[in-house]
Image (cartoon, grey):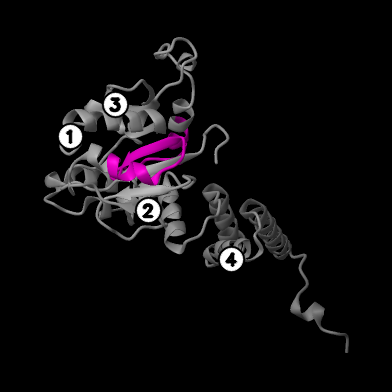
Amino acid sequence: MNEHTTDYDAIVLAGGAARRLGGADKPALSVGGRALLDRVLAACPDAARTVVVGPGRPTVRPVVRALEDPPGGGPLAALEAGLPHTTAPVVLVLSADLPFLTTETVHRLLATATATATATADGPGPGGDGAPYDGAMLRDASGRDQPLVAAYRAGPLRRELARLRAEHGTLAGLPLRALWTALLLARVPDAAATASFDCDTWEDIGAARARIREHGTVLDEWITAVKAELGIELDVDAAALLDLARDAAHGVARPAAPLTTFLIGYAAGRQGGDVQELSDRAAALAHRWAAEAEEAGGAARSGGGVTHDEAKPAE
C-alpha cells in the first residue's frame, strides 16, 4: 500500500437501472476491452476488502457481494447494504462507471480523508483546529462535488446512515446529498476531469472508448488491458521496450523486434527478473550486433574484406 494511505475497505455501487442507457447492464459495459466495473476494481487493488453492491457479475478479482433492499433503492440503500461487510477505519466509496479512475487518485483521497482539518484549505473541523475530517471526496474541474468518488471515515459514515434511517424509516430513494452535507469532507481537486468522468449515456461510453485510443494513452491502456486479461502483474516501461524493439529491428531484422520483446517478458515471468534490466541487456546485445554489421559493411565497401579467393588455402 502507498505509504501515505491507511487501511481501508472499498464499496463499489454497481446497481441502478441505467435508464439513460436503455436499461443496459452499465457496470458490465466494455471500455478498452475491460468491463467498467473491473476498471474501477483495478483502481483499488490494495483494499483490505472490496464489497460490490448490485446484481452478481463476473469480476477480475474476488469481491464480497451485497444487494440493497429493495434492489435499485438508490445509493444510500446500497451503502447501508455494503457497510456491514467492512471493518476498516476508512471506507472508499465508488460508483462502478468510472473508466479513468486511478490508484493515484484513490490514494490521494485516502491520504486526505485521514488528515486533520488544519492540513488543507477547508479550515478547522467541528472540534476546532486539529479535528479530523469525516472524509474526502473528489471535486471535478467544473467545481462539482463527487460523493461517489470519496473516502469516508467509517465511524461518521455509520453514524449518519443510522441517523437518516431513524429519521426516515428507510434509506431507499433518499438523495445522496442528505448524507454528505452532514459530514465534514475535504475536497480533492480533479483538475484534468479524468478520474471523475462517469458514463451515464451512450455518448459518454463512446467518448470514453475514443479517449483510451488517443495517441498519448493507447499503449498504456493496451498494456494494462493485456496484463488484466492474462492475470499478471508486471511493471512495464513501454518506452524502454519500444526503444529495444527499434534497436532489434534496425540492428538485426524487423521480425526480431516482436520476438525480442516476447522473450523479455518470458524471461521476466520465469525468472522474476526486472524488465528494465533485461531490456538493457538485450538492447546492449542489439547494439553489439548492429556494430558488427556496420564494421563488416564498412570493410566490404573499402575493399578490406577477405575475398573468397583469398580465403582458399594455397595449392
Within-10-Å neighbours for mark 3: few <14, some 14–19, many 20+ = some
**How far separated are the C-alphas under marks 3 and 1?**
19 Å
Residue wearing tag 1: 169
The region drawn magenta spans 79-108
Q: Is residue 280 left or right of residue 193?
A: right
Eye-nearest disc, 1 or 4: 1
In terms of secondary structure, where does tag 4 sit? helix
Within-10-Å neighbours for mark 2: few <14, some 14–19, many 20+ = few
Residue wearing tag 2: 64
Q: In the rendered structure, which amino acid carries the disc numbered 2?
A: Val
- Residue drawn at x 69%, y 56% as measured from the top left: 281
Residue wearing tag 3: 180
Front-lying residue, 295 or 8: 8
Eye-nearest disc, 3 or 4: 3
Q: Position of residue 231 (x, y in %)?
A: 47, 61
Within-10-Å neighbours for mark 4: few <14, some 14–19, many 20+ = some
Eye-nearest disc, 2 or 1: 1
97 falls in the magenta region: yes
- Image quadrant assignment for residue 257: bottom right
Q: Position of residue 64 (x, y in %)?
A: 37, 53
CB within 8 Å, label 3 to label 4: no
